[in-house]
Amino acid sequence: MKLQFLGTGTSTGVPEIGCTCPVCTSKDPRDNRLRTSALIHTDTGETLLMDCGPDFREQMLRSGFFGPIDGVLVTHEHYDHVGGLDDLRPYGRMGDIPVYSDAYTAGHLRMRMPYCFVEHTYPGVPRIFLREVQAGKIFHVGHTEVMPLQVMHGRLPILGYRVDGRLGYVTDMLTMPDVSYEFLHGVDVLVINALRVKPHPTHQSIPEALEAARRIGARETYFIHMGHHAGLHAEIDRTLPPHIHFAYDGLLLEF
């Protein structure tokens, strides 16, 4: 399995517009973070996109990948996670693309992008269609098994995913029920959000993410969805345990 981090930043991205803090003015490219998204290539040949935010077009130009996308796994309906769905148009030339989400998110996408989900679409509309899934109920994208699991984004229930039994992907989490922790036990790689050092009302802080990572016990853990208040990549990453890392845009893992 291959995992490429397309973006690792929070909803404002890093640098944040108008900010002159040390992170936003850093020359280290690892401190420049587009909105969080990832591309997964499975061992059985499927390509999955994890969320599709407003930076999707730029992310894909950077990645150089142009091939069939077999499914988009959406965590929730916030703009920084779905704002790029219209830019799937070029990928739709290779076939219709299913977008997997919970019913709440699907309802919001139908209202936000009605032109994509009507019976008779006009030429040029992205060839996407919705597939509603539920936390705790396995589904398959081709030969790849996907388990959605419930995550609490503050008080909003959203989805995380376990892919092929080996990758756990959780973003925008504040808390998670015990059963979701159980679903993630045994993953080789865990990707999980760590917004900043101080607590936040809807996202994990870095100390909270460290505790969640410890509880899940993956072989390797990568933090995502960092804001500029998380600190400089080079400084924070070296303070983390050896098996826990700050991810960065463009990082490619193979496991």
Image: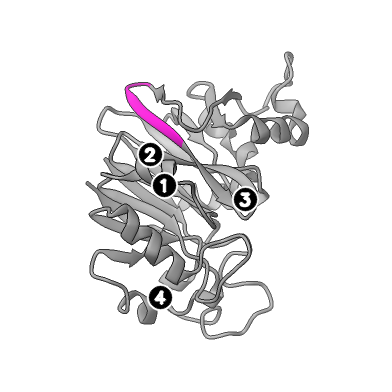
Q: Earlier in the sequence, mark 4 or mark 1?
A: 1
**CB atoms at circles 1 and 2 under 8 Å apart?**
yes
Magenta segment's dominant SS is: strand
Q: Earlier in the sequence, mark 2 or mark 3?
A: 3
Residue at x-position 22% and y-position 46%: 255
The amino acid at mark 2 is Arg
| Viewer-nearest residue: 123 or 55 | 55
Which quadrant of the view contains residue 29? bottom left
Q: Which residue is mark 4?
A: 233
Give coordinates of residue 190: x percent, y percent.
Answer: 34, 51
Q: Earlier in the sequence, mark 1 or mark 2?
A: 2
The vertical placement of 183 against 12, above or below, is above
Q: Of the numbered discs in the image, which one, if any, rests on residue 169?
A: 1
The amino acid at mark 4 is His
Give coordinates of residue 229: x percent, y percent.
Answer: 55, 77
Q: Which residue is mark 3?
A: 54
Give coordinates of residue 31: x percent, y percent.
Answer: 46, 73
For discs 4 and 1, the disc positioned in front in the rendered view: 1
